[in-house]
Amino acid sequence: MIREADRERLNRLRTTDPFYTRILSLYESYGGGYDFVGFWVQEADGKPVSAISRFEDKFSLYLTEDSDLEEVSAFLRFQGAGAVMTACGFLLDIEGKRMIEGQVLRYTGEIYNSDLELYTPEIKPLYALLQSCESEIFRVPEYMSFLSDVTHRRSLGKCTILGTNVDETLASAVMTVSETEDAVILGAVATHPDFRRRGLSRELVRTLSSKISEQGRAVCVFSASEANTRFYRNSGFEIVAGFREYIGSLW
């Protein structure tokens, strides 16, 4: 049975799993008080076995071997999901849709501190930097949506941004896109095309990941390309799982 989730139901699934981290972080950032988010758990014999979140029309799934995939698929159809991210290995009833597959990596590197001068950049130059790095697999949201979300999560301590300058210009940055008490997911790792091949992104990723690891929290990242996976593996990460994202109008 799938029912609306509250903090107590979500916390009964507590884990450092990155898919669960995405869901719990979103709940802790917005709760159930906004119409653009939604949260559910699937239960079997009174025990939570799956968690589901919605941000606008984008869904994240935390599934287990006890999940009822047929019920989850029917639920997504009913909700009119526009995109779904889940771990590989769970076969949902989704056919004929554009799909991205990639790797989930976890930081296992040593404690590291960069010699670069690092700081927390403002949102506007960060957004401009991200725009300079857009690609087929890296899309930047509309500015006001980005500004609202990042500002809100930063006010709650749910978003950390680290950057470095070259010639007084923000050249490279990394930010957390999900944070809980137990785990963190990195995202929006970007270096301006004019300042690449200097090792800036690696310095930022290693420094921030090391800092978070020292706090006793897991650090994960989603990679949708071989080049990115290679970059993270060279930055102290190891592959721990695969993910699958279905994109477009699913039903």
Image: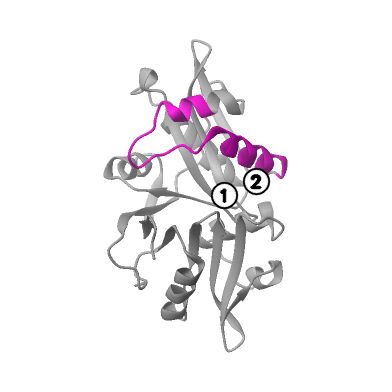
Q: Looking at the image, which is closer to me, 78 or 88?
A: 78
Please tell me how crowded label 2 is: few (under 14), some (14-19), or many (20+) other residues with Cα within 10 Å: many
State whether residue 68 appears in this view: yes
Label ID, residue 205: none
Please tell me how crowded label 1 is: few (under 14), some (14-19), or many (20+) other residues with Cα within 10 Å: many
The residue shown at (58%, 52%) is 217
Give the magenta part as a residue range. 127-156
Q: Quadrant of residue 149?
A: top right
Q: Picture coordinates of residue 3 (x, y %)?
A: 61, 76
Label ID, residue 178: 1
Q: Are marks 1 and 2 in contact (CB under 8 Å)?
A: yes
Question: Judging from the image, what secondary structure is the residue with disc 2 in?
Answer: loop
Judged left or right of residue 92, residue 15 is right
Q: Is residue 47 magenta?
A: no
Provide the residue designation for mark 2: 158
Furthest residue toward bottom: 45
Question: Judging from the image, what secondary structure is the residue with disc 1 in?
Answer: strand
